[in-house]
Image (spheres, grey):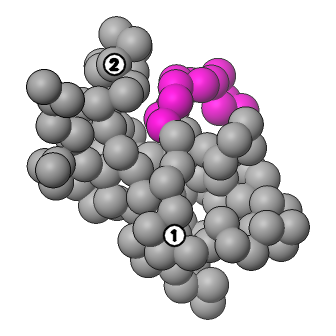
Amino acid sequence: MSQHLLECYLQKANQFEALKVFDEHSEYLEIGKILTLSIDKDDDDKECVFAKIGTDRIGCLSDEDSKVIRKFLKAKWKEIFECRICKVDEKADENKRYSVVIKILDHPD
């Protein structure tokens, strides 16, 4: 079981590897595909919460959406989150093309 935390758009998909990754691996675009969250520096040297498939960045969360998550990731608590693709609209604006849902996983005990 898990608790819903937020649903948000992945931003800057065109600036990262998203289009290349999805062209090479169309199965990654499936609703429900699990992504990894991590903190990295963007091109402006600003810390961002990125969604990744393997080592490929496919987008980042907005500053507002990543405020809470960033603190946990900095504290090495990334395993408490589950991030999944929940909506794909290939005709939408770059910042609204992919939506993800982020959940807090229940403690395994």
Which SS type dominates the magenta stretch?
Answer: strand
Residue 18 picture quarter: bottom right
Left or right of 49, for residue 72:
left
Q: Is residue 78 above or below residue 49?
A: above
Classify mark 2: helix, strand or loop: loop
Question: In the rendering, at what x and y percent does residue 43 appear?
Answer: 71, 33
Q: Which residues are magenta?
A: 37-49
Q: Please name the residue shown 60% across and 25% down the image.
A: 40
Marks 1 and 2, the one that precedes in the sequence: 2
Q: Is residue 87 above or below residue 55?
A: below
Classify mark 1: helix, strand or loop: strand
Question: Which callout, 1 or 2, points to the residue nearer the camera?
Answer: 2
Closer to the camera in the image, 36 or 57? 36
Q: Please name the residue shown 42% across and 58% down the image.
A: 84
Indicate yes or no whether the magenta region holds residue 94. no
Question: In the rendering, at what x and y percent does residue 1 appear?
Answer: 15, 50
Label 2, on which residue? Answer: 77
Question: In the rendering, at what x and y percent does residue 51 appear?
Answer: 54, 45
Q: Please name the residue shown 74% across and 75% down the image.
A: 26
Residue 98 badge: 1
Left or right of 5, for residue 102:
right
Tell me the amino acid under the disc marked 2: Trp
Left or right of 109, for residue 68:
right
Q: Is residue 96 above or below residue 17?
A: below
Residue 24 picture quarter: bottom right
Indicate yes or no whether the magenta region holds residue 48. yes
Placement of the C terminus among the 4 image quadrants: top left
Closer to the camera in the image, 77 or 45? 77
Label 1 Cα crowd, 10 Å radius (few <14 / some 14-19 / many 20+): many
Q: Please name the residue shown 34% across and 10% down the image.
A: 75
Question: In the rendering, at what x and y percent does residue 42 appear?
Answer: 65, 32
